[in-house]
Image (cartoon, helix red, strand yellow):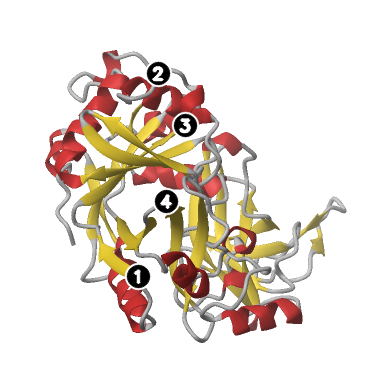
Amino acid sequence: MPLNPLHPLHQRADASFIAYGPEGQTVQVVDTFGNYEAEYAAIRKSVGLIDLPQRGLVRITGDDRVEFLHRMLTNDTRTLQPGQGRRAFLLNTKGRIEADLIVLHDRDQTWLELDLSDVPHLVEQFDKYLFTEDVQIKDLSEPYTRLALHGPEASARLSEVVNDSPSDPASFSDMPLFSHRPIDVAGHRCIVFRSDDTGPPGLHLIVPRDGVAAVYQRLLNALHYDHDAPSTTPNRGRPIGWLAYNTARIEAGTPIFHIDFGPDSLPHETGILDQAVSFTKGCYLGQEIVARMQSLGHPKRILVGLRFNDDRMPIAGTEVYTPTPPRATGQGAVAPLPTVSANAIVGGITSSTVSPMLGGTAIAFAIVKWGTHTADTHVAVPAEGHRITATIQPLVFLKS
């Protein structure tokens, strides 16, 4: 894995880290800078700056690249105009997801932004299906890395640091989803694209690795944030870690590949089918399976949201059960029995958090059997030594 040049800076700021990625391919990601509440508040009230060393980048060039990508990916790349982008999946011949990526189309090249651990396999698969086409594939995960700004003031803060743009928040706030443009920050040429992972506007920067320290510091300056005196600086935003980002992205209904769905998943099971799959384009790798699933009407399982009544939070991997029929209490009210049978397992938790915006109650994503997925269905989930009731709902908990 490429070395993260910001890691020493984060260490000096007393950050704690978590390992992200599959075994043998992990990268160290900031978990928190020691003040989760303030980091989360920055996402919701101002802006949070996050380092994302777990993201990778592939560049596709050549005269045939648009047609090649169009027949490889689940979404339409043929109609993309320069500066536009789309989310898409790379599938295998069995219709299972091998990569979840953002396609950023430009006049002379196309960028694919995806999980760092998936880059080698994607390059290998593309090479496998290339014959005489004029297509060149290059892994740029080593020379480039990723930063992001999440929050209502992301546009205003980025406008302040861009060398070739006036200090006008509208210069970024009106960017369509997944659109992109080149910018200069601290003397380094970057690409900014929009992806609203946490609900408020999300502006993601693809940054040259040899310039990321200067870009990161310039963004910190725009936030008026000083790691040595964080409590005395104006509240214009702050650096954030995975813990705060994870809470906000679950609230916003943003599932992540390798966490909430994975290589065993079909597109219909992800809860984001409409974002990543076109049913009006031509054939692509795995398309027959996707089309058959669409004609059958539904998958066997699907990712959903779960909302709990208090802050007892199940951990990822916890099984989800169908609760036993309710019983009457002494006051004539009805309450679910806490016991379940082993054959009543209907799914499992993939991500969970306690939501500050929902009164401190626990929320989660879960993959559940079709038929259990309907909104307002009650299920039972073990959490903190108790078996508690949760209500199924759509993935998005907070409307932006």
Residue hosting label 2: 166
Q: Residue at x 50, y 70 (%)?
A: 73
Residue hosting label 4: 107
In front of the other: 12 or 57: 57
- Where disc 3 sits, the SS reads loop
Give the distance between the C-alpha atoms of the residues marked 3 and 4, in whole angstroms: 30 Å
In front of the other: 304 or 310: 304
Give the distance between the C-alpha atoms of the residues marked 3 and 2, in whole angstroms: 20 Å
Give the distance between the C-alpha atoms of the residues marked 4 and 1, in whole angstroms: 14 Å
Going by the numbered disc 3, the residue's amino acid type is Gly
Q: Position of residue 302 (x, y in %)?
A: 63, 69
Residue hosting label 1: 135
Which quarter of the figure is the N terminus placed in? bottom left
Mark 3 and mark 2 lie on one chain; the one further toward the N terminus is: 3
Quadrant in which residue 51 is drawn: top left
In front of the other: 262 or 185: 185
Quadrant in which residue 99 is drawn: bottom left
Going by the numbered disc 4, the residue's amino acid type is Arg
Mark 1 and mark 3 lie on one chain; the one further toward the N terminus is: 1
